[in-house]
Image (cartoon, helix red, strand yellow):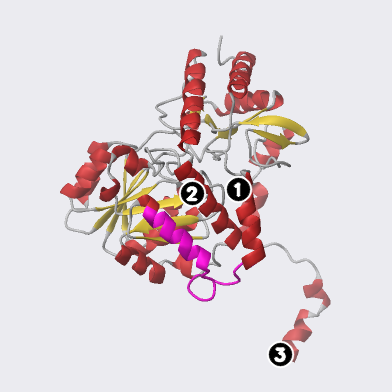
């Protein structure tokens, strides 16, 4: 040990060493710097206000059209107070995983409430929605088994597949015939079909009745990531399965608290034996510190509001229809969206960034989506409505879209 310490203290080793070749890619990455120099960099804009229909960004008030705070609960007084009370009772963190010392009574309460709400036997809470997908997929699909995924599924689903030892099959987005082709290729092996309920960029909804029919025919399991459906779709806000009346036909429901439930965290809901298996095999649960109590308390209270205030969902859908119709009347391409997620397809990255900058200058906060998040010819502005937007908000946004469209040559 002394010999090693002596070597480490030599002047030669105390000099900054030449960087390993591994880091060359970091120096070669200039895209962000180039966009910053052109005043077209759209990311990491710090807010100094809560997530509401209006936010403060860079010292000025803007209309927020990019948030997943669909029901407007992220700054709801009851939700905030529940989180504060949980800090007083439990502190700020759990200092361990659920598997060991990090399970709190409030975690189990939240799991019971979620299972009851989603009409499943049991539920399991994760630190994030991303980790819920990682844990579920990599644990459920084993070597010599198949995972079949929509090509536009969320990145967390893709990464969960990469962590499993199963073979991966991809089918064209929302293409039922192509899904059947891939299922036929997996014949004779156990298979799990995984789809988003609501696709996070395009705003379209999975064709769940047809997918359920194919899963039955080919004896495949079905998992639906309903991050953007919970609280939004269905008569009771239970998501895509309720929207189609297929609650009993989805084997595994995955979701997040970071959208309608105004918090952070993720969950899996399924049969009790599936949940018990995942509790003991999902690595992203076993080897991660557990969800802090304030986040669990906020999600619990938000779930109460989802159940007891359906008028919020009605207001959200009224705002969504108004914004959709206004954008279409202006001549913008909003694709096949059926959700409060409204994409505006620009399809040219330079025009997209100029258009985003014009909107930002006019006080409209939106999210430009570029490759690799979407293919280059599908570059888009991603917007989302909230229940707390007013008619004045939406009309101001539509006026700004018309003016920015004229400035950038996107509308006559």
Q: Which residues are magenta?
A: 91-116
Q: Is 106 included in the stretch rendered in magenta? A: yes
The CA span between labels 3 and 2 is 57 Å
Give above or below for 318 relative to 304: above
Question: In the rendered view of the protein, which quadrant contains the C terminus?
Answer: top right
The CA span between labels 1 and 2 is 11 Å
Question: In the rendered view of the protein, which quadrant contains the N terminus?
Answer: bottom right
Viewer-side label of 1, 2: 1
**Tag 3 near tag 1, CB within 8 Å:** no
**Tag 1 near tag 2, CB within 8 Å:** no
How far across and down, in percent of the image, does residue 46 sit?
A: 71, 42
User: What residue does disc 3 label?
Assistant: 1
At 63% from the left and 50% from the top, the residue drawn is 80
Viewer-side label of 3, 2: 2
Viewer-side label of 3, 1: 1
The quarter of the displayed image where residue 74 is located: top right
So how many labels did they put on this image? 3
At 32% from the left and 64% from the top, the residue drawn is 272
Q: In the displayed image of the protein, which residue is found farthest to the bottom?
A: 2
Give above or below for 54 relative to 78: above
Q: Is 102 included in the stretch rendered in magenta? A: yes
Q: Is residue 224 left or right of residue 391?
A: left
How far across and down, in percent of the image, does residue 410 sit?
A: 56, 16
Which mark, residue 303? 2
User: What residue does disc 1 label?
Assistant: 78
Q: Is residue 286 visible?
A: yes
User: Which residue is more in the foreground, 220 or 38?
Assistant: 220
Which mark, residue 329? none
């Amino acid at each position: 040990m002394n010999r090693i310490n002596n070597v480490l203290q030599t002047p030669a080793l105390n000099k900054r060493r030449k960087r390993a070749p591994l880091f060359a890619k970091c120096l070669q990455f200039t895209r962000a710097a180039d966009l910053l120099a052109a005043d077209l960099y759209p990311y990491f804009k710090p807010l100094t206000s809560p997530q509401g229909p209006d936010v403060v960004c860079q010292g000025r008030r803007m209309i927020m059209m990019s948030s997943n705070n669909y029901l407007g609960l992220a700054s709801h007084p009851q939700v905030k107070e529940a989180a504060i009370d949980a800090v007083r009772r439990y502190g700020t963190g759990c200092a361990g995983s659920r598997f060991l010392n990090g399970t709190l009574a409030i975690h189990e309460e939240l799991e019971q409430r979620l299972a009851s709400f989603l009409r499943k036997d049991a539920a399991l809470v994760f630190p994030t929605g991303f980790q819920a997908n990682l844990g579920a997929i990599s644990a459920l699909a084993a070597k010599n088994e198949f995972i079949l995924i929509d090509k536009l599924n969320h990145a967390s689903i893709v990464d969960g597949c990469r962590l499993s030892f199963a073979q991966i099959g991809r089918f064209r987005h929302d293409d039922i015939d192509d899904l059947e082709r891939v299922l036929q290729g997996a014949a004779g092996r156990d298979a799990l079909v995984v789809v988003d309920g609501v696709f996070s960029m395009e705003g379209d909804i999975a064709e769940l009745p047809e997918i359920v029919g194919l899963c039955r025919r080919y004896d495949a399991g079905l998992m639906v990531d309903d991050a953007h459906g919970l609280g939004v779709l269905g008569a009771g806000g239970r998501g895509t399965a309720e929207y189609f009346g297929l609650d009993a036909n989805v084997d595994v429901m995955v979701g997040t608290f970071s959208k309608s439930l105004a918090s952070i965290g993720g969950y899996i809901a399924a049969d009790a034996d599936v949940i018990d298996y995942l509790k003991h095999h999902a690595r992203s649960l076993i080897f991660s510190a557990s969800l802090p109590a304030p986040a669990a308390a906020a999600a619990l209270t938000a779930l109460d509001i989802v159940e007891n205030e359906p008028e919020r969902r009605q207001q959200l859908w009224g705002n969504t229809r108004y914004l959709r119709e206004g954008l279409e009347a202006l001549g913008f391409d909003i694709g096949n969206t059926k959700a409060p997620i409204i994409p505006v397809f620009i399809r040219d990255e330079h025009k997209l960034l100029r258009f985003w900058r014009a909107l930002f200058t006019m006080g409209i906060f939106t999210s430009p989506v570029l490759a690799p998040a979407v293919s280059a010819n599908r570059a888009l502005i991603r917007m989302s409505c909230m229940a707390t937007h007013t008619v004045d908000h939406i009309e101001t946004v539509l006026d700004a879209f018309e003016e920015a469209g004229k400035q950038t040559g996107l509308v006559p």
